[in-house]
Amino acid sequence: MKALRVDPIACDGRGLCAELVPERIALDEWGFPIVDPSPLTPSLERHAERAVAACPMLALRLHWLDPKEGQTGRRPRRR
Amino acid sequence: MNARLLAGVATRITPTFDHHLALHGPLESRDDLIDELERAGLRGRGGAAFPTGAKLRAVAQTGGRPVVVANAVEGEPVSGKDRALLRVAPHLVLDGAVAASRVLGARDALVAIADRTGRERAIVEAAIAQRGRHDGRVKLRTAAVQHRFVAGEETALVRALGGRDAKPSLKPPYPFERGLDGAPTLVANAETLAHLALIARFGAAWFRSAGMAESPGTALATVGGAVAQPGVHEIELGTTLDRVLEQAGGATEQVQAILVGGYFGRWVSPANGRELRLTPDVLGAGAIVVLPAGVCAVAECARVLAYLADESAGQCGPCVHGLRAIADTMSAPGASDRRRRLEQLVGLVDGRGACRHPDGAAGFLRSALHVFAADFAAHAKRGRCNGRNVSVLPLPPRQRR
């Protein structure tokens, strides 16, 4: 399963992602994305891929939730 | 409890290398140091309380020639323990850097100090000169980085040491994967390395003979505010907050609340202080401030939150805008919906930066809203409370407002 994540340093709040995947991304009052990190269904994943490609700052990422599943898998941020 | 890091330390006198060796004995190499650290259960003393053995193992498993960084940047205004440690026991920190470098195969070990801290850097340089710059294959040096709150964050520190701005970067990659000049880098707090130096000498069982099973050992705490003996104290982990305040000579005035863990920490009411056990997670970087009764807590928190907003690295939108909005709301004269707005803003900044700066500010504010609920209510109703507006919480001069 894959999920969405934003690089908050790269992101400058253009907001395209929230239009393309409103099911998973909302914008805060300053226009920065609030990303739901839960797994994407196959149909949502297609929209998510489009949003990743559309981000002008390349700040939106799709990642494997289980790193062993994919080569590009990365661990979630430690809290 | 017998002092460990501060053992045999006469205040304000930096011991020579000979004194240090007479006090602690020589540092022998040990190949099983990482196992021993894991058995000891040492956790980092810089704020994140990450298991030190696991950190070294991660560096060792990355492959390539690692670099060791002793982090003594200490950007937290409430904390002074790493600088104090460098003044009274620089060789213990250097021993820790050397022991870690030996087991990891690192050839470069550096002590990172904030550029404002010229005195400590001179002391460490003198200590390096006494023992010799080269310890076997390990070369020791010091490095100064820009003094700012986030400069001690590990990715910011690695960038600053590489000659760039002291600003955090997104993790992963962690410094243990790709750090200074791309090398796997162990970034460990200066105090953590001093404990490591003692574990390398005396072992895990000795380390565990102080503290509690889940949080073994001792820790340095910087205790400030209304206590009889403010300053750096070595405490046994797992003791209650009350015991630590006693160790600092006890409160000099009636206590309103206690800030535990510095500006990324949380406020504790005096009643809860009797129960609260100080584990590495709770202690953070070890800074404790006693706020006396009669001081306006809302004004105090407003000053700190304005400082934290100024100290945002300015990279992540939610941190830049959110901390500014929090600071503005805090300093606005008692709007009646202020509390609700602050709660909303806490939710909007928490966990939304590349580093934990916004999370730290959110935790500080959340606990303030809880512990000082009556004061916030008084401000909402009357625009003020009965407290005096004086600054107890320390801030660097530039930001004092």
Image: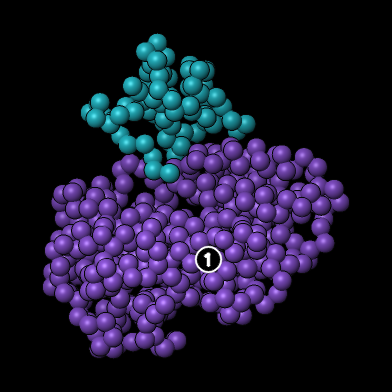
Chain colours: A cyan, B purple
The N terminus of chain B lies in which quarter of the figure? bottom left
Q: What's the residue type where badge 1 is placed?
A: Thr
As helix, strand or loop, the secondary structure at mark 1 comes to loop
Q: Is residue B37 visible?
A: yes
For the point 59% across and 64% down, which residue is it? B274
The answer to whether residue B330 is left or right of residue B262 is right
Q: Residue at x 24, y 30 (%)?
A: A68
The percent coordinates of residue B17 (x first, y second) are 26, 85
Locate residue B170, reporting x and y percent. 38, 42
- Pointer 1 local density, CA inside 10 Å: few below 14, some 14–19, many at least 20: some
In the figure, residue B191 lies in which quadrant? bottom left
Residue that lies at the very extreme toward the top in this rendered image: A43
Q: Position of residue B193 (x, y in %)?
A: 31, 67
Q: In this picture, is B269 found above or below B130?
A: above
The residue singled out by tag 1 in the image is B240
The residue under the point 32% across, 36% down is: A75
Residue nearer the viewer, B373 or B361: B373
B306 or B245, which lies in front? Answer: B245
> Nearest the camera: B233 or B277?
B277
Image coords of residue B367 (percent x, y): 62, 51
Q: Quadrant of residue B70?
A: bottom left
A62 above or below B128? above
Q: The disc numbered 1 marks a residue on which chain?
A: B
Q: Residue at x 53, y 71 (%)?
A: B244
